[in-house]
Amino acid sequence: MQNMKTIALTICFCYLLFSCGEVQVRKSVYNSIPLQKGKKLDLVYKDPNLDFKSYDGLIVKKTAAEVPTTDVVPSESVADAISSALYEEIKGAGIFKDVKKEGQEVTLKYLVLETSLTELNPGSGAKRYLIGFGAGASNIQVEGKIVDPTTNKTLFAYVDRRAGWIGVFGGRSRSLILDDAIAHAKDVAEELQSSTP
Protein backbone atom coordinates (compact mmCIF):
# COMPACT_ATOMS: atom_id res chain seq x y z
CA MET A 1 0.00 0.00 0.00
CA GLN A 2 2.86 2.37 0.86
CA ASN A 3 4.44 1.67 -2.55
CA MET A 4 1.20 2.60 -4.33
CA LYS A 5 1.09 5.96 -2.51
CA THR A 6 4.72 6.62 -3.40
CA ILE A 7 4.11 5.76 -7.05
CA ALA A 8 0.98 7.93 -7.19
CA LEU A 9 2.81 10.89 -5.61
CA THR A 10 5.73 10.46 -8.01
CA ILE A 11 3.39 10.44 -11.02
CA CYS A 12 1.60 13.57 -9.77
CA PHE A 13 4.90 15.32 -9.11
CA CYS A 14 6.22 14.49 -12.61
CA TYR A 15 2.96 15.65 -14.21
CA LEU A 16 3.14 18.95 -12.37
CA LEU A 17 6.82 19.39 -13.09
CA PHE A 18 6.49 18.85 -16.84
CA SER A 19 3.11 20.54 -17.40
CA CYS A 20 4.22 23.88 -15.94
CA GLY A 21 6.53 26.49 -17.33
CA GLU A 22 6.62 29.04 -20.09
CA VAL A 23 3.84 29.05 -22.65
CA GLN A 24 5.20 27.63 -25.89
CA VAL A 25 4.24 29.29 -29.16
CA ARG A 26 2.85 26.86 -31.71
CA LYS A 27 3.97 26.70 -35.32
CA SER A 28 3.07 29.95 -37.07
CA VAL A 29 2.01 30.88 -40.58
CA TYR A 30 4.64 33.61 -40.32
CA ASN A 31 7.56 31.18 -40.37
CA SER A 32 8.97 32.97 -43.45
CA ILE A 33 9.21 36.26 -41.49
CA PRO A 34 12.22 36.66 -39.14
CA LEU A 35 10.35 36.83 -35.83
CA GLN A 36 12.21 37.64 -32.59
CA LYS A 37 11.24 37.81 -28.91
CA GLY A 38 9.17 40.93 -28.31
CA LYS A 39 8.99 43.23 -25.29
CA LYS A 40 5.37 42.29 -24.57
CA LEU A 41 4.50 39.71 -27.24
CA ASP A 42 6.02 36.27 -27.74
CA LEU A 43 7.41 36.79 -31.24
CA VAL A 44 7.62 40.03 -33.22
CA TYR A 45 8.91 41.32 -36.56
CA LYS A 46 9.45 45.04 -37.14
CA ASP A 47 10.45 46.44 -40.51
CA PRO A 48 13.77 48.31 -40.08
CA ASN A 49 12.25 51.42 -41.76
CA LEU A 50 9.03 51.31 -39.72
CA ASP A 51 7.40 54.76 -39.42
CA PHE A 52 3.66 54.85 -38.65
CA LYS A 53 3.60 58.67 -38.76
CA SER A 54 3.91 58.69 -42.56
CA TYR A 55 0.46 57.04 -42.84
CA ASP A 56 -3.01 58.53 -42.29
CA GLY A 57 -4.05 55.75 -39.94
CA LEU A 58 -4.79 52.08 -39.35
CA ILE A 59 -7.72 49.85 -40.27
CA VAL A 60 -8.37 47.04 -37.75
CA LYS A 61 -9.87 44.15 -39.70
CA LYS A 62 -12.14 41.60 -38.05
CA THR A 63 -10.11 38.79 -36.48
CA ALA A 64 -10.41 35.55 -38.45
CA ALA A 65 -11.31 32.49 -36.37
CA GLU A 66 -9.14 29.75 -37.87
CA VAL A 67 -10.02 27.22 -35.18
CA PRO A 68 -13.15 25.16 -34.64
CA THR A 69 -15.62 26.44 -32.08
CA THR A 70 -15.89 24.65 -28.73
CA ASP A 71 -18.92 23.89 -26.56
CA VAL A 72 -17.54 26.16 -23.85
CA VAL A 73 -16.29 29.11 -25.90
CA PRO A 74 -17.46 29.91 -29.46
CA SER A 75 -14.40 30.84 -31.55
CA GLU A 76 -16.31 33.64 -33.33
CA SER A 77 -17.09 35.41 -30.04
CA VAL A 78 -13.42 35.20 -29.00
CA ALA A 79 -12.35 36.55 -32.41
CA ASP A 80 -14.86 39.43 -32.06
CA ALA A 81 -13.55 40.19 -28.56
CA ILE A 82 -9.98 40.30 -29.89
CA SER A 83 -10.95 42.67 -32.75
CA SER A 84 -12.85 45.02 -30.42
CA ALA A 85 -10.09 45.06 -27.81
CA LEU A 86 -7.40 45.69 -30.44
CA TYR A 87 -9.41 48.60 -31.88
CA GLU A 88 -9.96 50.19 -28.46
CA GLU A 89 -6.40 49.71 -27.17
CA ILE A 90 -4.62 50.86 -30.35
CA LYS A 91 -6.93 53.85 -30.75
CA GLY A 92 -6.45 54.81 -27.09
CA ALA A 93 -2.65 54.53 -27.34
CA GLY A 94 -2.44 57.39 -29.87
CA ILE A 95 0.10 55.61 -32.06
CA PHE A 96 -1.71 56.38 -35.31
CA LYS A 97 -3.33 59.62 -36.47
CA ASP A 98 -6.59 57.70 -36.90
CA VAL A 99 -7.85 54.17 -36.20
CA LYS A 100 -10.89 52.73 -37.97
CA LYS A 101 -12.74 49.44 -38.04
CA GLU A 102 -13.01 47.40 -41.19
CA GLY A 103 -15.74 48.75 -43.48
CA GLN A 104 -15.31 52.43 -42.63
CA GLU A 105 -14.24 54.81 -45.41
CA VAL A 106 -10.53 55.55 -45.56
CA THR A 107 -7.89 57.09 -47.83
CA LEU A 108 -5.19 55.11 -49.60
CA LYS A 109 -2.59 55.97 -46.95
CA TYR A 110 -4.01 53.65 -44.28
CA LEU A 111 -2.24 50.56 -42.99
CA VAL A 112 -4.23 47.37 -42.33
CA LEU A 113 -4.02 45.17 -39.22
CA GLU A 114 -4.96 41.57 -40.05
CA THR A 115 -5.27 39.09 -37.17
CA SER A 116 -6.16 35.42 -36.82
CA LEU A 117 -7.13 33.31 -33.85
CA THR A 118 -4.98 30.23 -34.51
CA GLU A 119 -5.46 28.32 -31.25
CA LEU A 120 -8.36 28.07 -28.82
CA ASN A 121 -8.36 25.58 -25.96
CA PRO A 122 -10.80 26.15 -23.07
CA GLY A 123 -8.77 23.91 -20.76
CA SER A 124 -10.30 22.28 -17.70
CA GLY A 125 -11.69 24.15 -14.69
CA ALA A 126 -11.56 20.92 -12.68
CA LYS A 127 -7.83 20.46 -13.33
CA ARG A 128 -7.15 24.14 -12.57
CA TYR A 129 -9.00 23.77 -9.26
CA LEU A 130 -7.86 20.31 -8.17
CA ILE A 131 -4.28 20.24 -9.46
CA GLY A 132 -3.32 23.86 -10.20
CA PHE A 133 0.24 24.79 -11.17
CA GLY A 134 -0.78 25.32 -14.80
CA ALA A 135 -2.70 22.07 -15.23
CA GLY A 136 -5.95 22.58 -17.15
CA ALA A 137 -4.90 26.00 -18.44
CA SER A 138 -6.94 27.62 -21.20
CA ASN A 139 -4.92 28.75 -24.24
CA ILE A 140 -5.33 31.17 -27.12
CA GLN A 141 -2.87 32.07 -29.84
CA VAL A 142 -3.26 35.15 -32.00
CA GLU A 143 -1.19 35.97 -35.06
CA GLY A 144 -1.26 39.39 -36.65
CA LYS A 145 0.43 41.65 -39.13
CA ILE A 146 0.28 45.25 -40.22
CA VAL A 147 0.44 45.58 -44.00
CA ASP A 148 0.78 48.52 -46.35
CA PRO A 149 -2.03 47.69 -48.81
CA THR A 150 -0.51 49.70 -51.67
CA THR A 151 2.75 47.69 -51.65
CA ASN A 152 1.51 44.57 -49.79
CA LYS A 153 4.62 44.89 -47.59
CA THR A 154 4.46 43.56 -44.03
CA LEU A 155 5.72 46.27 -41.67
CA PHE A 156 4.96 44.57 -38.34
CA ALA A 157 4.03 40.97 -37.50
CA TYR A 158 3.58 39.02 -34.31
CA VAL A 159 2.60 35.71 -32.74
CA ASP A 160 1.25 35.78 -29.19
CA ARG A 161 0.09 32.82 -27.11
CA ARG A 162 -1.68 33.21 -23.77
CA ALA A 163 -2.56 30.77 -21.03
CA GLY A 164 -5.20 31.39 -18.37
CA TRP A 165 -4.76 29.23 -15.34
CA ILE A 166 -5.73 31.28 -12.30
CA GLY A 167 -9.28 31.73 -11.08
CA VAL A 168 -11.54 31.21 -8.10
CA PHE A 169 -12.38 27.48 -7.93
CA GLY A 170 -10.46 26.95 -11.18
CA GLY A 171 -11.99 29.92 -13.00
CA ARG A 172 -14.44 29.84 -15.87
CA SER A 173 -12.80 29.06 -19.20
CA ARG A 174 -14.80 31.71 -21.06
CA SER A 175 -13.82 34.54 -18.72
CA LEU A 176 -10.16 33.43 -18.66
CA ILE A 177 -10.04 33.42 -22.46
CA LEU A 178 -11.76 36.81 -22.77
CA ASP A 179 -9.37 38.25 -20.16
CA ASP A 180 -6.49 36.90 -22.26
CA ALA A 181 -7.96 38.58 -25.37
CA ILE A 182 -8.00 41.96 -23.60
CA ALA A 183 -4.49 41.49 -22.17
CA HIS A 184 -3.31 40.52 -25.66
CA ALA A 185 -4.69 43.75 -27.15
CA LYS A 186 -3.04 45.87 -24.45
CA ASP A 187 0.30 44.21 -25.13
CA VAL A 188 -0.05 44.70 -28.90
CA ALA A 189 -0.65 48.43 -28.32
CA GLU A 190 2.39 48.64 -26.01
CA GLU A 191 4.57 46.74 -28.50
CA LEU A 192 3.47 49.11 -31.28
CA GLN A 193 4.23 52.13 -29.08
CA SER A 194 7.72 50.82 -28.39
CA SER A 195 8.19 50.34 -32.15
CA THR A 196 7.40 53.96 -32.98
CA PRO A 197 10.48 56.16 -33.47
Image: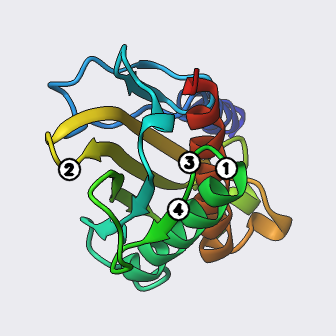
Q: Which amino acid does label 2 sit on?
A: Pro
Q: How far apart are marks 2 and 1 (CA)?
A: 24 Å
Give the secondary structure at mark 4.
strand
Residue 29 is situated, as x and y percent measured from the top left of the image, at 19, 40
Q: Mark 1 points at which residue?
A: 186
Q: Can residue 179 be seen in this view?
A: yes
Mark 3 touches mark 4? (CB < 8 Å): yes
Q: Position of residue 154 (x, y in %)?
A: 25, 35
Say which mark, if any, is on residue 96. 3
Q: Which of 61 and 116 is in front in this view?
A: 61
Which residue sits at x=53%, y=27%?
A: 18
Distance between mark 3 and mark 1 Cα atoms? 15 Å
Secondary structure beneath label 1: helix
Query: Where does label 4 land, which residue?
Result: 99
The kind of residue on which mark 3 rests is Phe
Mark 2 surroundings within 10 Å by alpha-carbon count, few (fewer than 14), some (14 through 19), many (20 or more):
few
Point 43% across, 36% down: residue:
54
Q: Distance between the residues labelled 3 and 4?
A: 7 Å
Quick one: 70 or 55, which is closer to the camera? 55
